Image (cartoon, rainbow, N blue to C red):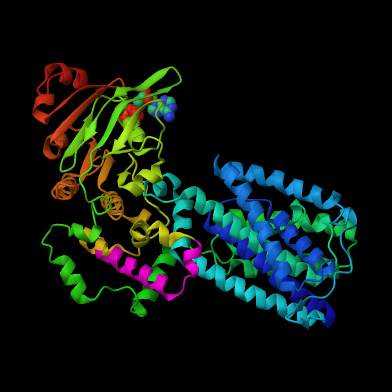
């Protein structure tokens, strides 16, 4: 019995490591992969071969396994990620099947017989020669890996992962590197699965392809779902449940041939029941309650309240936003014109934008108007890099940015909003701003392990985000989820999030739509403040001529994909031909 319990206790940390690493990928990153068992296998085989055939110690052997799993998933993730997240799922099915085939057919993996008589691991000359010692080794690795994952989740990188899980285009429009971040989390999570594989060989001392099949990937998925997606401690519970079930059946004196299918049926039923009755898993919490609980805890610790003097200093701005706090225009202090030359794009047979040459000047609010379907949003998509033009070029200042992606243009200072608000709804108001404030340099996975200096930076960013919220009038709601704000507050937060990037050119798609008069006046006031410094430019798409008159000093009129005319609002709106085109009657 002691042998049995020790063996179980040695297996539990391995399952926890698998669950924690998979939770990082699926729970926090929103990426579904089914090749976790395959990468687990790569770690197991590499460790077994290096220990048995090359007499390596455990640590270098397991690290080689982790690196192999990491590098392979980096390649797979990059290739799949360039297409779409759904594609990652499909590609990982193929990778999983291919890996098992390799394990089954390569000579050095022992083909279907596997590798037996793997020596007990040694570390710095010390041999872990009993099951108990091996179990302790696994728990030590588990503790270190859990601590590392905790750090990753609660870091700017983890925050960015959550933002990407919420809304990739919105994150990219803030200059965030979506593909690279997703690829690194996939590689990181797979490398950890590789370490779990190395520990597994030391536990069983025998491995075969049957242990690394798709079934094991499903088992890891079950651990994560049972524990709760993005519930950090969830995999601890999930792993206990998944491990306990076959053991309980083994006590029930059921033959192996029957126990396997029963096991599968019970798993599936349990996971289905959970998905129906407790979709957040056993340890998953309601995000609204969770944010309230965090707020109370932080307030109790005195962690996030701006000092009274700091609050007073920010409030003293007398109704105007202290834009220097947002560093608006700071990324490109020299005044730059965003311009296009002969832009064009067709969707099938429809020429949505045709030979459009526009210039958006700093110090001005330019309005892009035209009837429905005129191509206004498509022009924004082309200028911001969300779509690649079939023809024409786009310049920012002297630089040709035609070949740059949406995030690269945002990094240069050209940001855009969407017709919908597109906040990171499941994140708090403060996190929405904090993500935008953080520079991409501080959001890499490596940066999270640079000691104290980095932490100082993130806390300074957090304080800055708080001061921004104070000046936006959203400070008291900083711990609410973005989805729980009123529509007007959401629009203000969306503007604040864009400003927090410190960009110098803002493309705003219908920023006033859905706002009442008070909120519209507030936003229009903000837009005027932004361009007042003369170095920042704004272009809005707007349907209401009243709003255009109130805020814009230049109007560009688009119809059927072509720029018909441009001029001051008076000139354009007093042109009877254009008003007839727009309204079918005079204004
Ligand atoms: N991805 C796409 N695929 C196919 N057609 C598209 C696509 N995007 C836009 N279109 C078409 O291109 C034309 C211009 O659309 P766009 O959304 O740019 O117009 P808009 O002036 O912004 O309209 P609205 O004022 O109604 O938002 C429309 O006919 C639209 O149906």
Give the residue displayed 89% in from the left and 65% down from the top: 116
Viewer-side residue, 354 vs 285 = 354
Most common SS among magenta residues: helix
- Residue at x 22%, y 29% (from the top left corner): 369
For the image shown, how many numbered marks are present on the structure?
A: 0
Query: Image check: 350 left or right of 124?
Result: left
In this picture, is 433 found above or below 296?
above
- Locate residue 500: give its quadrant: bottom left
Check residue 450 for magenta coloring.
Answer: yes
What quarter of the picture does the C terminus occupy? top left
Q: What is the x, y in percent for residue 305?
A: 29, 74
Q: Residue furthest front?
A: 398
Image position, residue 273 (x, y; %) = 64, 56
Q: Give the vertical position of 368 relative to 577 (above or below).
A: below
- The boundaries of the magenta stretch are 445-467
Q: Position of residue 192 (x, y in %)?
A: 64, 64
Quarter the N terminus occupies: bottom right
The answer to which of 236 and 139 lies nearer the viewer is: 139
In reply to whether residue 489 is colored magenta, the answer given is no
Where does ligand 1 appear, by image quarter?
Answer: top left
Q: Is residue 285 above or below residue 492?
A: below
**Of residues 259 and 44, the one drawn nearer to the viewer in this rendering:** 44
Residue drawn at x 15%, y 18% as measured from the top left? 585
Q: Is residue 244 visible?
A: no
Which image quadrant for residue 119?
A: bottom right
Query: Is residue 511 or residue 129 the one in the foreground?
Result: 129
Query: In this rendering, would 336 be left or right of 253?
Result: left
In-image side of 63 versus 421 (left or right): right
Percent from the top left, x then y, of residue 194? Answer: 69, 62
Residue at screen point 81% across, 47% down = 101
User: Is any atom of residue 394 visible in this view?
Assistant: yes
């Amino acid at each position: 019995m002691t042998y049995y319990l020790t063996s179980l206790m040695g297996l539990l940390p391995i399952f926890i490591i698998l669950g924690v690493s998979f939770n990082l990928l699926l729970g926090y990153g929103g990426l579904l992969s089914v090749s976790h068992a395959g990468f687990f296998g790569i770690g197991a085989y590499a460790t077994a071969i290096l220990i048995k055939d090359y007499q390596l110690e455990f640590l270098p052997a397991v690290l080689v396994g982790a690196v192999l799993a990491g590098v392979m998933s980096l390649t797979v993730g990059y290739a799949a990620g360039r297409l779409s997240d759904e594609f990652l799922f499909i590609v990982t099915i193929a990778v999983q099947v291919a890996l098992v085939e390799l394990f089954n057919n390569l000579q050095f993996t022992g083909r279907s017989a596997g590798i037996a008589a793997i020596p007990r691991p040694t570390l710095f000359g010390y041999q872990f020669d009993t099951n108990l010692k091996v179990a302790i080794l696994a728990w030590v690795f588990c503790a270190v890996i859990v601590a590392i994952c905790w750090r990753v989740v609660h870091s700017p990188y983890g925050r960015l992962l959550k933002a990407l899980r919420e809304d990739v285009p919105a994150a990219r429009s803030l200059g965030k590197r979506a593909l690279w971040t997703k690829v690194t989390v996939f590689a990181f999570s797979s490398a950890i699965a590789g370490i779990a594989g190395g520990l597994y060989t030391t536990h069983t001392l025998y491995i075969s392809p049957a242990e690394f099949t798709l079934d094991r990937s499903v088992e890891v998925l079950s651990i994560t779902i049972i524990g709760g997606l993005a519930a950090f401690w969830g995999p601890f519970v999930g792993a206990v449940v998944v491990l306990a079930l076959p053991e309980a059946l083994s006590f029930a004196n059921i033959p192996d041939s029957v126990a396997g299918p029963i096991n599968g049926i019970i798993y599936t039923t349990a996971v289905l029941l959970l998905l129906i009755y407790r979709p957040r898993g056993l340890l998953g919490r309601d995000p609204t309650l969770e944010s309230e609980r965090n707020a109370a805890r932080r307030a109790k610790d005195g962690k996030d309240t701006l000092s009274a003097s700091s609050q007073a200093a920010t409030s003293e701005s007398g109704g105007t936003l202290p834009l220097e706090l947002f560093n608006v225009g700071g990324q490109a202090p020299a005044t730059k014109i965003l311009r296009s030359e002969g832009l064009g794009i067709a969707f099938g047979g429809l020429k949505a934008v045709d030979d459009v040459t526009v210039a958006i000047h700093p110090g001005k609010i330019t309005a892009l108007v035209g009837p429905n379907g005129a191509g206004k949003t498509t022009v924004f998509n082309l200028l911001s890099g969300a779509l690649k033009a079939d023809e024409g070029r786009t310049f920012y200042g002297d630089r040709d940015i035609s070949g740059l992606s949406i995030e690269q243009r945002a990094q240069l200072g050209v940001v855009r909003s969407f017709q919908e608000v597109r906040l990171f709804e499941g994140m708090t108001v403060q996190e929405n701003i904090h993500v935008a404030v953080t520079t991409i340099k501080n959001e890499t996975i490596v940066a999270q392990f640079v000691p104290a200096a980095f932490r100082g930076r993130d806390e300074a960013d957090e304080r800055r985000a708080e001061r921004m919220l104070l000046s936006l009038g959203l400070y008291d709601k900083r711990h609410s989820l973005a989805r729980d704000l009123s529509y007007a507050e959401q629009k203000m937060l969306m503007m604040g999030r864009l400003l927090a990037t410190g960009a110098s050119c803002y493309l705003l798609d219908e920023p006033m739509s859905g706002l009442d008069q008070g909120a519209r006046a507030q936003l229009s006031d903000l837009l005027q403040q932004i361009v007042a410094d003369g170095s920042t430019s704004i272009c809005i798409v707007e349907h209401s001529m009243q709003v255009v008159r109130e805020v814009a000093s230049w109007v560009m009129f688009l119809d059927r994909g072509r720029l018909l005319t441009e001029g001051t609002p008076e000139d354009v709106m007093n042109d009877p031909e254009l008003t007839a085109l727009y309204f079918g009657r005079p204004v």
